[in-house]
Amino acid sequence: MKKYIPSILLFCLFETVAVSLWLAKDNLFYLLNFTYIGGCIAGGLALFVRGKRYARRFVQFAVGSYMLVYLGIICRENMQIEGLWYYLFLGVFEAAVIHYAVAKIFGPLFFGRGWCGYACWTAMVLDLLPYKRPEGLRRRLGYIRYIVFALSFAVVTGLFLMKAADLEEMMFRLFIGGNLLYYAVGIILAVVFRDNRAFCKYICPVTVFLKPMSYYSMLRVHCDESKCIQCGKCLKACPMDVEVNRESRKRRNATECILCYECVKECPVKALR
Ligand code: SF4
Ligand code: SF4
Ligand code: SF4
C-alpha cells in the first residue's frame, strides 16, 4: 500500500478542492468535475508506480479530452487564457479562473508543471508526434511567450472596450480558433525544430504563470549527485532540456520540468527519484 500513498494524497487534495467549491458555490458540478480530474490523475499515478508505461498517456487523454471536448466544446467554456481574462473582467470566480487558480497558478506550488505533463490538451496531441526527445539545440525564443501573453490580454481587453456584442459567443469562437491555431503552430514547430515540445518552450503564454510558480514546487525530481556517474542518459531522455543531474532548484531549465519521469526511468544507478 505504501507506494500508493502519493496517489491517495493527490486524490485527497483534489477532493478538498472539489468539496470546498461545491459547498462555497452551491454547485454540484464542482464536486463531479474535480472528483473526475483528481480520480484520473491519482489513477494514472497509481498505474505509473505499478510500472505501466501508458500511465501518463492515460491521464493526458482522460483529462485533456474531457476539458477540450466536454468543458470547451460541449459546455462552451473558454478554458484558455483568454477565458481567464474574460472572467476576471466580469469579476466572477468561475470556470477558467478556477481552472487557472488550481492547475496553473497555485497548484504548481504543490505539483509543479504536472498540468503540462499529464493534462494539457495541446500537449496531448503534440506528444503523439515522433520527436519525443529534442533533436536540436534549444533556441533563444522563449521571449515569444510574453508577446503571446500580452496579445491574449490585449484581445480580450479590446473586446470589452469596444463593448462587443454577444461576448459569450465571441469567447467560444476564440476558444475554437485559438486551439486550432495552437495545434497548427505546435505541429509546424515540432516538425521544423524536431522537438514535440517546441510550442511549450517558446510560444505557450501559460508558462508565464507556470514557470515562476513551479520553481517552488514541493513535488520535483531529486538527484542524488553522489550516486550520479555523469552518463548523460537523463539529459538525452528529457523532452524539456532540464539539467536534471543536478539537485539544485537553479539547475538549467529547472522550471521547464513537466514531471514526466522519463529521466528517472533512464538512470542506470537510480540517482534520480
Ligand atoms: S506549456 Fe502550455 S501547451 Fe505546453 S503543456 Fe504546458 S500548458 Fe500545455
Ligand atoms: S525527463 Fe525528468 S527532468 Fe525532464 S521533464 Fe521529465 S521529469 Fe522533468
Ligand atoms: S542518468 Fe543518472 S547517472 Fe546518468 S547522468 Fe543522469 S542522474 Fe547521472
Image (cartoon, rainbow, N blue to C red):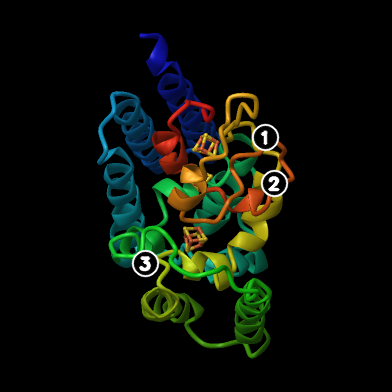
- Which three-letter amino acid code belongs to the residue tagged 1? Glu
Quadrant of the drawing holding the N terminus: top left
Quick check: 252 above or below 231?
Answer: below
Residue labelled with disc 1? 247
**Given contact means CB atoms under 8 Å apart, are the residues at marks 1 and 2 in contact?**
yes
Give the CA separation, mark 3 to mark 1.
43 Å
Q: Position of residue 242 (x, y in %)?
A: 58, 50
Please tell me which of labels 3 and 2 falls first in the chain: 3
Residue 251 is labelled as: 2
Mark 3 or 1, closer to the camera: 1
**Front one among 213 and 143:** 143
Nearer the observer, 6 or 245: 245
Counting from the top left corner in percent of width and height, residue 49 is at 35, 25
Other residues around mark 3 within 10 Å, as few (<14) / some (14–19) / many (≥20): some
Looking at the image, residue 222 lies above or below residue 213 = above
Ligand 1 neighbours mark 3 (CB distance < 8 Å) = no
Amino acid type at mark 2: Arg
Identify which amino acid the numbered label 3 is placed on: Arg
* Residue 76's disc number: 3
Relative placement, left or right, of 44 versus 236 is left
Q: Is residue 198 above or below residue 239?
A: below
Q: Nearer the viewer, residue 185 or 173?
A: 185
The residue that appears at 60% across and 43% down in the rendered structure is 108
| Badge nearest the viewer, 3 or 2 | 2
Q: Quadrant of residue 2?
A: top left
